[in-house]
Amino acid sequence: MNFLYSDGPIIACSTGTNANSAMAVIRISGFKSLSQFKDFFTKDLTGPIEPRKVYFTSLVLQGQFIDDVCLTFFEGPKSYNGENILEISVHGNMLNVERILGLFQSYAGCRLASAGEFTYRALKNKKIDLSQVEGLDLFLNAQSSYALEQGLSLLSGNLHDIYVELYNLFLIHKSSLELSIDFSDDIGEEAARDYYLKSLEQFSSKFSSLVKRVGPMGPGLLQPEIVLAGLPNSGKSSFFNFLLSEERAIVSSTAGTTRDYLTEFLKIGEVRYKLIDTAGIRESSDLIEAEGVRRSKSKLTNAFYRVLLINPFEISPEFDDLIINEFDLILFTHSDLPGFNEVRQKLILKHPSLGSIGAIDLTRISQEWETYFFNLVNKKYLDITLDKPILLDRHKGLILQADTILMRYQALATTEADVAILSHELNTLGSCISDILGIVSPDQVLNSIFSNFCIGK
Ligand SMILES: Nc1nc2c(ncn2[C@@H]2O[C@H](COP(=O)(O)OP(=O)(O)OP(=O)(O)O)[C@@H](O)[C@H]2O)c(=O)[nH]1
Ligand SMILES: [Mg+2]
């Protein structure tokens, strides 16, 4: 990230530049005065311009008409990022947007903004803290209504309030330790100790409700993936196509047809899942196929929902290793073929864990079956999100780290350990808590967060 320490006016199209649209919003941030753009608009920008009011005007270059636009001025520091911001709504043809961006770069001293640079300036100007930046990122990239909700909650809602309250309770407790060192003669040793223990209890009870919201690490809930796995010819691609209602993947009776995994979005309920068709698992001397199999296995490890498809007529030795994985659903295919029940029964005798699972016939799969499958996936997502798990790994990591330190600290506090040791532990705890809000954040943390942002935000 090269913008961390550079200022000056920046420009970007905040509505994206990948597709033509009716309108596009171009933003300029960090300029000293509106009058520096006076030659670009027929509206007189040297006169009074009311902030937050929309002005319809023409955009011109050296007297030549470019576009009809709407201007809105947000005056710093009362703006999104604390700087002067000008928003120009233009016609959203990509070529038009590009030429307007170019015009302000060539003739008005603006520089094209890097991804997330508008928001970085908001952080720098203390308009928002780091956890709110992450909330915004979560909101803008959400793949489910739950992630949307948590993004907002982190940006300006309940979760952010909890973090702030926790930090404040920590400061109160820290001051109680200082009080017991410096002023216990004034207020009495017992009163100081009471205050110390009470403030610790308040902090730890608030914190423990947060710890309960930490689930497993990884992108499972942020970008949930449904992975279809199985041996070659088990019917994965057939099922993939069925769920997408299109012939997206090649289906054939040649084992090993799918060589690399295929991904498509599939909306179920209020979640946009990545549906993944994988290469059939088998030993192969073919380097490309072997790589495809390796990728399939890795997709399976990180999946939110794992489906195993079994064609009981084609079982190879790799099957034993495959079923060691945990699956959310196991589907038997080829149930329309004669002898299905016998081969299925034989397989179940060998692997009793498969016994309780029903058979489906992919050649006769029906709408009801699709609804049944969607309900299963949906239920898992709803069950997991019921307890409002925290989605961001950085936060989960810090909360777990703080939890370990807090347990150690509480043990020391109750045994009335030496104040120097208590102070040391408390400072370590404090840095975890303040890191969640990003009160002091190293550059690499900032870099990793801002690398997710899109240009124009
Ligand atoms: N009769 C019958 N044929 C099926 C069924 N499901 C799939 N098939 C057929 O089985 C063959 C293999 O199906 P695919 O969907 O390509 O299997 P796959 O698991 O993707 O196979 P790979 O890509 O090689 O790993 C195709 O000829 C399908 O038409 C089923 O339930 N019944
Ligand atoms: Mg396939």
Image (cartoon, rainbow, N blue to C red):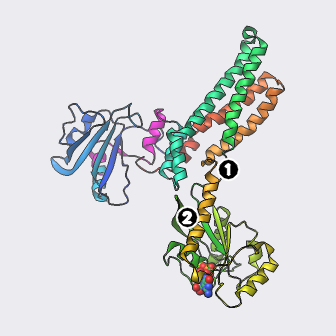
Q: In this view, does 351 lie above or below 439?
A: below
Q: In this view, does 56 lie above or below 349?
A: above
Q: Which residue is drawn at 33% across and 33% down?
A: 75
Is 108 inside the magenta-drawn segment? yes
Ligand 1 in which quarter: bottom right
Q: How far apart are marks 2 and 1 (CA)?
A: 21 Å
Going from N to C along the chain, the mark reached first, 2 or 1, is 1
Percent position (x, y) of residue 43?
19, 40
* Label at residue 215: 1
Q: Is residue 235 left or right of residue 452?
A: right
Q: How crowded is mark 2: few (under 14 residues within 10 Å), some or many (20 or more)?
A: many
* Label at residue 274: 2
Percent position (x, y) of residue 209?
68, 39
Percent position (x, y) of residue 123?
48, 37
Q: Is mark 2 on a helix, strand or loop?
A: strand
Q: What stretch is highlighted in magenta?
A: 102-128
Q: In this view, does 285 lie to the left or right of 148?
A: right
Q: Are marks 2 and 1 in contact (CB under 8 Å)?
A: no
Q: In this view, does 109 lie to the left or right of 385?
A: left
Q: Residue at x 32, y 52 (%)?
A: 24
